[in-house]
Image (cartoon, helix red, strand yellow):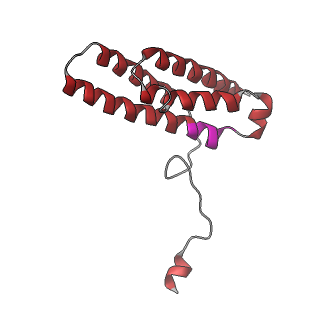
Amino acid sequence: MLARLLRPRHEASAHCDLPCGVYDPAQARIEAESVKAIMKKYADNDDPVFRTRALIIKEQRAELVKHHLWVLWTDYFKPPHLEQYPQLHQLFWDATKLAGAAGAKGTVDASQADDLLAKIDEISKIFWETKAA
């Protein structure tokens, strides 16, 4: 009975414990830059232990890229943004695929990281246009 009385009536979820309203594509970009740098370090090193560590860290960073992109897509952008920028859905689809197993997470090809960074730049441009409006 007491548990039922103390249970919250409304639940909310956000990318952090308190919906702060602070969003910035720079978070995804920083992680994507890290992915690219790790790919280069991987290519320049023949030590198998170093390369294993590099792959693990690269995959973790690529997962963070996906997380930060999805936070923007699901928490920041709203239907009016999609009406104004109909390419948003495809941009996020492409960017998260480039961060995932088919892209940066699953390869050491730095050109994949460059493609991912380009998509993040496109998203960032739209993001800042919407913030200025």
**In this orientation, which residue lies closer to the viewer: 96 or 1?**
96
Left or right of residue 35, residue 118 in this image: right
Q: Main secondary structure of the magenta part?
A: helix
* Residue 36 in sight in this render: yes
Q: In which quarter of the image is residue 87?
A: top right
User: How many numbered marks are there?
Assistant: 0
- Residue 68 on image: x %, y %: 52, 36
Left or right of residue 64, residue 19 in this image: right
- Residue 31 on image: x %, y %: 43, 28
- Residue 129 on image: x %, y %: 69, 24
Query: Which residue does the image show at 47% across and 14% down from the upper left?
Result: 111
Is 99 magenta? The answer is no
- Quadrant the C terminus occupies: top right
Query: Which residue does the image show at 26% across and 30% down from the upper left?
Result: 53
User: Where is 25 relative to 15, above or below?
Assistant: above
Q: Quadrant of residue 123?
A: top right
Is 73 magenta? The answer is yes
Query: Which residue does the image show at 44% across and 31% down from the upper left?
Result: 62
Left or right of residue 69, residue 108 in this image: left
- Residue 64 on image: x %, y %: 45, 36
Numbered range of the magenta stretch:
70-77
